[in-house]
Amino acid sequence: MSATIAIMATKASSKRQSFQGASIAIVAIMASGKKPKSSELRALIARRLKIARQAYEPNAAAVARALGITPQTMNKYEQGTTFPDELFLVKFSDLTGIPMDFIFRGRFPQEMPVVLAARIGVLDPELVPGNPSPASKAGQEFETNG
C-alpha cells in the first residue's frame, strides 16, 4: 500500500471509517519504514481510549466523574481534540484495569482482564491482533465462494 493510498484511506466520511483509515495509514507508513506522524498516533490513542472506556463502562459521564474530570473533557480526549496528560492516563488505567500498553501500543498484555479484552474485541474487532479487517474478510469470502 502506498503512502498516497494510506492518506486517501484516512479521508472517510463516518467516524468508524476514519478510525479504520487511520489504522490503515499507520500500518502503511510503518511498513514503508517512515515514522508515523504524532497526529496519527494521537488518533489511535484516542480511539483505544474510547474503546477501553466503553469496554469498562458505557457511560462516559460516570467514568469522567470517577476520574475527577468533566464529561466534556472526557469527550475531547476520546475524540482526539485534546490529548490527556500522563496523570489522567495513569488514573484511567488504575480505574479501568486497562493497561497503558494497550492505550499506547494497542497490545493486549497478560495483565489485561480477559472480560475487558473480550469486550474490546466485540466493540472494535479491528483492534484485536491477528483479526483480519472487514475488507480482507470480504476478499476471503469472494475467493472461497467465487
Image: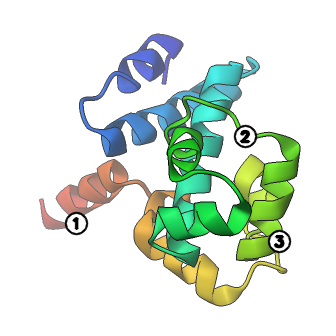
Q: Which mark is residue 70?
A: none
State the separation of the CA atoms marked 1 and 2.
45 Å
What x and y, as percent, mark residue 126? 47, 57
Q: Earlier in the sequence, mark 3 or mark 1?
A: 3
State the separation of the CA atoms marked 3 and 1.
45 Å
Identify the element where label 1 is drawn: helix
Asked where in the image residue 98 lies, by quadrant, the reply is: bottom right
Relative to residue 30, is residue 143 drawn left or right?
left
Asked where in the image residue 146 lies, by quadrant, the reply is: bottom left
Would you place residue 5 above or below residue 42 in this image? above
Amino acid at pointer 2? Pro
What x and y, as percent, mark residue 93? 79, 65
Q: Residue at x 41, y 54 (%)?
A: 133
Relative to residue 89, is residue 22 drawn left or right?
left
Q: 79 or 134: nearer the eye?
A: 79
Q: Earlier in the sequence, mark 2 or mark 3?
A: 2
The extreme left residue here reads: 146
Mark in the foreground, 3 or 1: 3
Residue 26 appearing in the image: yes
Q: How is the image coloured?
A: rainbow
Q: Which mark is residue 84?
A: 2
Residue 128 appearing in the image: no
Q: Residue at x 71, y 62 (%)?
A: 67
Would you place residue 138 above or below residue 75 in this image? below
User: Count of labels shown?
Assistant: 3
| Residue topped by disc 3 | 94
Identify the element where label 2 is drawn: loop
Q: Residues within 10 Å of mark 1 (few under 14, many from 20)?
A: few
Amino acid at pointer 1? Thr
Mark in the foreground, 1 or 2: 2
| Residue topped by disc 1 | 144
